[in-house]
Image: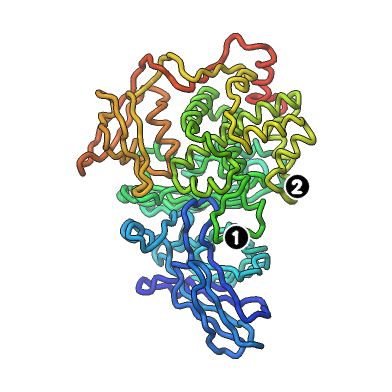
Amino acid sequence: MTMDLANVTKEKDRVRITVVPPPMKTQKVYYVLPAFITDVGKPVDALQFVHEFYALDDRGMPLKVKKAGNNKVLIKLDKGRVLRKIEYWVDDSWDSTGYSAYHSGKYNYVPNAAGTTFDTDKGFLLNPAFMIGYFDGAMSLPYRLTIIHSESDNAFTSLQLTESVKGRDEYLSGSYTELVETPLYYGAVDTCGFLSRNYYIDIAVYSESGNISARQIRKYIAAEIFSLTRFADGLTPRHYKMFFWFVSPDKFAVGNHGKFGGMSHRNSAVYYLNEIEEEEPFASLVGGETAGDLLKSLALLDQTRYDNYPDYLIPQVRSNWWIAEGFKSYFTWLAEVRDSVASEEDFRAAISAKMRLSENVKTHSVTDVKHLRKALTDPLKAEEYKAKAMLLAFTLDIHLTQWSGGAKGLREVVLELNERSSFHPDSLCNYISKNISIEMNDFCLKYVNGVSALPVIQSFDKIGWVYSPSALDSVITFGQISLNYDSQIDAFLVRTAEPGNELRVLAGDRLVSIDGVTVSAANMDEILNTIYSPVDTSPIEVIYIRNNRNERVMAQPYYKTIVIEHLVRLDPACSSDALLLHERIFNPSDY
């Protein structure tokens, strides 16, 4: 397969794809591009970006082609003829998924980090799912990809490079599933790298303003990366690549349409973020967006490891979704608490926030794939299920550590399972039940595959925490405010607001930014925590829209005695057993 980047022009902003197929003895050949990709809830319908599709047989004669559904092309051959070549042109998704195109219904929504852009001035971001398809029944075959490009362009990808000669690079991928999980960038970037235990981290930055360097990003993420690599210590050496595209600060409104965010993969990650001039909120944005992504290199936390040849015409949600999402969030916190990058108090506040978020997850289990495929298309519902998944991981770790007598926690089990060559959705439950405790079967039946309320009171008591569904406490607050999320415009709207609240918002106001960070689904968790759980009384700058006018206020939270829901505190009178289990989880002597 060949992608021709060298002949892209501003007038014809498309890339030509040439496919030389394997021999296939059939008169009907189906060429498929993904309707859905992992970690994007809504359909992406990759075939919508394909134009001028044609095919030739082994005599060089054109073949009949027609769409066979939204994302399949049927190629018909005469008896005895063989498909020799396919060619077509591809539009980039960034130009096609703007506000007007998306809301007119012409295109389905594609997050920028998951999509493609062909810009001769800025560079080429290539996510293969939007450029290359697979032949039905031949997904397991290896892919040899050739990129033709300008000699001045640098490549950044984790794909295996087999040859590079004067503007022509060749890569090898073991299967289509592996290929779509491996984005590429061609252009001018600033790069740097560093070694963190067994991981070598490569960072590449394209900054539209020219103000952001790779070394600056390294400074923002180094502590977190060290914590994560220490947490996953013992793995074979890894090479992980992180590519960042920063838009200029003057493109402030682009995030209103949900384009900002990241997309992590097994060996690499892509981030499309807005540059913020103030360093502290900018560092927070970068750190929050990259948090935990490196853990996807752990096999159990990578959804695609369970399904080598998935059906890309259906939503890419699997019954192990809760492990991939919940363990990633929990392990990130646990690694940072163990390394003192974050405090246990911060973690308790996060647990409290997750409990509030997960209150609506009562009628469906975290393994109900049919329901999840629909629920995860809504960013707010997705956050609610992610919160439930993280709480489930934390609760399981508490019980597992106790069952094993402190010998093993969830981390140790995951690292042991990581050595396996294959997995199925029940691998975790079966392994713990067989090797550590039969009680895991009951845990899975009730809380993983069932809808029983998590045993948080009993679980927290085991580690010396006190949980109260509601209690009086002195807290820092801006005043009582509740928000609604509008998925059509990717915006948070004020649902209710206490009179005299420090943010000065009213019902119906639309939040635009907090401390220069655009509010969208991409940073939902961070924004909710900033508003609902401020850590101190430092003022924040808030911009919101009221009656089509931007309002800007400096809001300062204050201490107030109120009824707190889901209050989590240390128990000063806890038992010695609880103290031991607490230390084993948060500060193990053998870590």
Question: How far apart are labels 1 and 2 at the CA level?
Answer: 24 Å
Could you tell me which residue is drawn at 46 percent across and 18 percent down? Answer: 470
Q: What type is the residue that disc 2 sits on? A: Arg
**Taking 212 as reference, is 37 above or below it?**
below
Judging by the rendered image, the residue that carries numbered circle 2 is 420
Residue 242 visible? The answer is no
> Residue farthest to the front?
363
Q: Where is residue 175 in the image (x, y as percent from the top left)?
A: 65, 63
Work out which quarter of the rendered image holds the C terminus and state it.
top right
Could you tell me which residue is drawn at 29 percent across and 25 percent down? Answer: 498
Could you tell me which residue is drawn at 62 percent across and 69 percent down? Answer: 136
Residue 523 visible? The answer is yes
Q: What type is the residue that disc 1 sits on? A: Asp
**Taking 54 as reference, is 562 above or below it?**
above
User: Of the numbered discs in the image, which one, if any, rests on residue 311?
Assistant: 1
Could you tell me which residue is drawn at 60 percent across and 25 percent down? Answer: 455
Answer left or right for 368 relative to 94: right
Q: Which colour scheme is used?
A: rainbow
Label 1 packing within 10 angstroms: few (<14), some (14-19), many (20+): some
In which quadrant of the rendered view does residue 416 lie?
top right
Q: Position of residue 154 (x, y in %)?
A: 51, 63
Q: Where is residue 557 in the image (x, y as percent from the top left)?
A: 33, 23
Work out which quarter of the rendered image holds the N terminus and state it.
bottom right
Q: Is mark 2 on a helix, strand or loop?
A: loop
State which mark lies toward you, 1 or 2: 1
Answer left or right for 296 relative to 3: right
